[in-house]
């Protein structure tokens, strides 16, 4: 079947696009029809890691590069899985093309700093999810990004596949697919060991200048791919157990040492707090389509400048954004860190309380902290000078992976968390060690607060706990 699909590397005379470090992505006319579409070309101006380049200067790679990388990696997944009878007998050519198209388009709705701004959606604010925007773009519902013809028309006419099925693979939770084959195919895009993660771990690691995302045996993991017992997700054979363990550990270390590095979280918290304040001030467009168009039409730096232009003179947003615009880098400094690590009752209670608050509740606690610092320490932090960072609430665990062993007395299939103390420890440590709540302040107040560290945490705990 792969021989009939040139996107799987079987065709002659293909054009190739080179990606770092040494990837050669096959490009067919129907692939180029998508890549050359204005909506896809827009991804050239959207950095993969948003404002993280303020901490890791090399992290200026784009969603465009990543999307091509996921497309290539999904092709590798399919080529390996087609050697597995349990997969090959379940799928047809349209299935394979749908997965490839979904891999190519999975980030088509991303806008600058989307992950920082989407965090507001989980805290009670109506901020757009990039998956929902992807559906609008593919269908051609956003006139500015429709081009001469919609992506849906290209998928239907040139790829011969159903655009709505592509959208479903991108926007719907994998468990919501009714057909087993759709859940299986969607797991190539989103699961514990999917093609998206395989690309971004290595690509982000490369551009950030850290080794953590590349320290697993990629080829052996690909060679071990198989189908889970229920037929609804990809799994690994016994030889893939160790690569899968290390893959999950790589993801853990990338969050611990890179994605959620305290300075990266400072930048994200500043962006999130600014957007929340602008929403509260009522200066953002009320019309969803207008807001989406404003977000999609700007590169990262231009977006920060746009938000700064909207910020009222006396707003929190203006103060915060001032440290990230106008060629300035005045990032907020951490002064208090809360986690579940030490199982201290008051610290844990404060942590859980903050994690349960929406944007309005976090603002109330922020004001209580400012008052407490002023009254107890005599340090008057102005509005916008202190922000609380609560990490994303939809990242509480690593999705499990099924391991298929040879048939030995009823021990054929096991979950990786059941047979790997390493993976169980990683899952626990992610919540207890990596997922921290931090309090950041404008840099001019950091030294004064840190000099009173003996009192600072007690003051903060007293202000946080109801």
Image (cartoon, grey):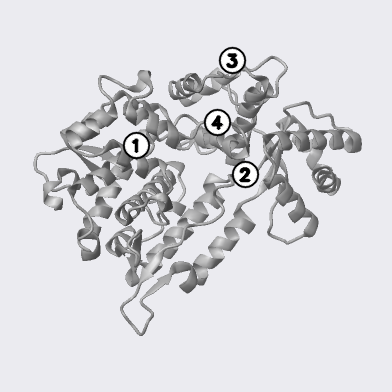
Q: Reading the chain from its start, which is encountered first: label 4 or label 2? A: 4
Q: Is residue 408 left or right of residue 97?
A: right
Q: Secondary structure at mark 2?
A: helix
Counting from the top left corner in percent of width and height, residue 306 is at 54, 18
Q: Secondary structure at mark 3?
A: helix
* Residue 309: assigned label: 3
Counting from the top left corner in percent of width and height, residue 86 is at 24, 64
Q: Residues within 10 Å of mark 3 (few under 14, many from 20)?
A: few
Please identify, in this view, whether the residue under mark 3 or under mark 2 is nearer the observer. Answer: 3
Q: Residue furthest front?
A: 178
Do the residues under discs 1 and 3 have CB atoms within 8 angstroms?
Answer: no
Tag 4 residue: 127
How far apart are the alpha carbons under marks 3 and 2?
28 Å
How far apart are the alpha carbons under marks 1 and 4?
25 Å
How far apart are the alpha carbons under marks 2 and 1?
26 Å
Q: Reading the chain from its start, which is encountered first: label 1 or label 4? A: 1
Identify the residue at horizontal 31%, vertical 78% (top origin): 406
* Residue 82 in which image quadrant: bottom left
* Residue 65: assigned label: 1
Q: Reading the chain from its start, which is encountered first: label 1 or label 3? A: 1
Choose between 369 and 130: the one closer to the eye. Answer: 130
How far apart are the alpha carbons under marks 1 and 3?
30 Å
Please identify, in this view, whether the residue under mark 1 or under mark 3 is nearer the observer. Answer: 3
């Amino acid at each position: 079947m792969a021989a009939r699909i040139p996107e799987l590397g079987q065709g002659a005379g293909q054009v190739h696009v080179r990606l770092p470090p040494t990837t050669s992505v096959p490009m067919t006319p129907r692939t180029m029809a998508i890549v050359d579409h204005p909506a896809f070309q827009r991804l050239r101006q959207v950095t993969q890691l948003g404002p993280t380049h303020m901490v890791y200067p090399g992290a200026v790679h784009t969603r465009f590069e990543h999307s091509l990388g996921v497309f290539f990696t999904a092709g590798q997944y399919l080529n390996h899985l087609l050697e597995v009878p349990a997969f090959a007998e379940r799928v047809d050519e349209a299935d394979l093309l749908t997965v490839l198209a979904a891999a190519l388009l999975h980030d088509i709705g991303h806008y600058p700093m989307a992950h920082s701004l989407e965090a507001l959606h989980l805290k009670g604010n109506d901020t757009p999810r990039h998956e929902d925007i992807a559906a609008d773009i593919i269908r051609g519902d956003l006139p500015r990004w429709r081009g001469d013809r919609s992506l849906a028309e290209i998928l239907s006419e040139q790829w011969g596949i159903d655009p709505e099925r592509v959208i479903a693979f991108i926007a719907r939770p994998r468990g919501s697919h009714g057909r087993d084959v759709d859940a299986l195919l969607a797991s190539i895009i989103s699961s514990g060991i999917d093609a998206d993660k395989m690309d971004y771990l290595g690509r982000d690691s490369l551009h950030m200048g850290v080794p953590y995302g590349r320290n697993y045996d990629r080829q052996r993991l690909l060679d071990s791919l198989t189908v889970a017992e229920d037929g609804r997700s990809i799994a690994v054979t016994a030889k893939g157990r160790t690569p899968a363990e290390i893959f999950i550990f790589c993801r853990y270390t990338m969050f611990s040492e890179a994605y959620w590095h305290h300075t990266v979280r400072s930048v994200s918290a500043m962006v999130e707090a600014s957007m929340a304040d602008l929403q509260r001030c009522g200066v953002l467009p009320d019309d969803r389509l207008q807001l989406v168009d404003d977000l999609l039409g700007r590169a990262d730096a231009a977006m920060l400048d746009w938000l700064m232009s909207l910020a009222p003179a006396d707003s929190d947003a203006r103060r915060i954004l001032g440290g990230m615009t106008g060629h300035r880098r005045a990032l907020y400094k951490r002064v208090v860190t809360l986690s579940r690590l030490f199982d201290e009752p008051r610290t844990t209670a404060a942590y859980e309380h903050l994690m349960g608050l929406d944007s309005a509740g976090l603002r109330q606690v922020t004001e209580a902290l400012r008052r407490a610092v002023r009254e107890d320490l005599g340090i008057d932090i102005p509005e916008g000078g202190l922000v609380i960072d609560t990490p994303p609430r939809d990242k509480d665990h690593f999705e499990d992976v099924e391991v298929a062993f040879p048939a030995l007395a009823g021990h054929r299939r096991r979950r990786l968390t059941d047979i790997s103390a390493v993976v169980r420890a990683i899952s626990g440590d992610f919540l207890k060690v990596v997922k921290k709540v931090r309090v950041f302040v404008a840099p001019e107040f950091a030294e004064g607060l840190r000099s009173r560290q003996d009192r600072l945490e007690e003051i903060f705990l007293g202000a946080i706990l109801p």
